[in-house]
Structure formats: C-alpha cells, structure tokens
Image (cartoon, rainbow, N blue to C red):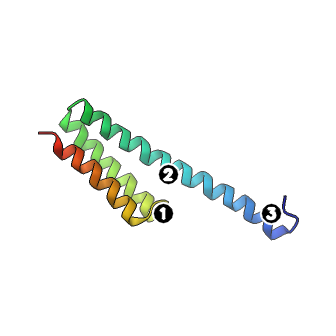
Amino acid sequence: MANIKSAKKRILVNETKAARNKAIRSKVKTACKKVEAAVTAKDKAAAQANLLAATSEIDKACTKGVYHKNTASRKISRLAKMVNGLA
C-alpha cells in the first residue's frame, strides 16, 4: 500500500476510472450480443434496430477513450456486415 498522499489518491482515482471503463465496455458487449442474437434468429428488423443502438454505444465508448477509434470502427464494421448478410 502506498504511503504518500498523492499515491493514495491515484489508487482511488484509478479504481473509479477502471469501474467506469468496465461499465462502458459491458454496455458495448451487451449491445453487440443483442445484434448477434437477432442475426442468428434471422430477424432483420430487430437486427437493424439493435445495430443502430450498438453503433451508438460503441461510438460513445470511443469518444470517452475506452476503445481506440480503429477498434470501434472494426466492431461496427463486423456488426454491420453480419446484419447486411441477412437477405
């Protein structure tokens, strides 16, 4: 455990930020799973609606610095490709 006051504060701040990042990442994963579930159920309307929501969540995570912009783009691209695969 740290003895210096600023080091103790850093530990607390890092825990807070880690919890926030984990919550955001969890939201993204849940949104992606909803899209994947709709695609496996072959429900195009639900898949498109969930894709819109997932894209929004991924963009928010990217803006907040949780995901790198290329990672966010890759996730969105893969989801869109799955949804567009439904004919």
Give, as a three-letter code, the residue at label 1: Lys
| Residue 17 tag number | none
Mark 2, Cα crowd under 10 Å, few <14 / some 14-19 / many 20+, is many
Mark 1, Cα crowd under 10 Å, few <14 / some 14-19 / many 20+, is few
Q: Quadrant of residue 63?
A: bottom left
Give, as a three-letter code, the residue at label 2: Ile
Image: 24 above or below 63: above
Tell me the residue that label 3 is attached to. Answer: 8
Q: Residue at x 28, y 48 (%)?
A: 79
Q: Position of residue 4 (x, y in %)?
A: 86, 69
Q: Position of residue 5 (x, y in %)?
A: 84, 68
Tell me the residue that label 2 is attached to. Answer: 24
Give, as a three-letter code, the residue at label 3: Lys
Q: CA distance from mark 1 to mark 2?
A: 9 Å
Q: Position of residue 19 (x, y in %)?
A: 61, 51
Image: 77 above or below 47: below
Residue with the most extreme left position: 87
Q: Nearer the viewer, residue 15 or 1?
A: 1
Q: How many marks?
A: 3
Q: Residue at x 42, y 41 (%)?
A: 30
| Residue 64 tag number | 1
Q: Is residue 7 left or right of residue 51?
A: right
Q: What secondary structure is found at the residue carrying circle 2?
A: helix
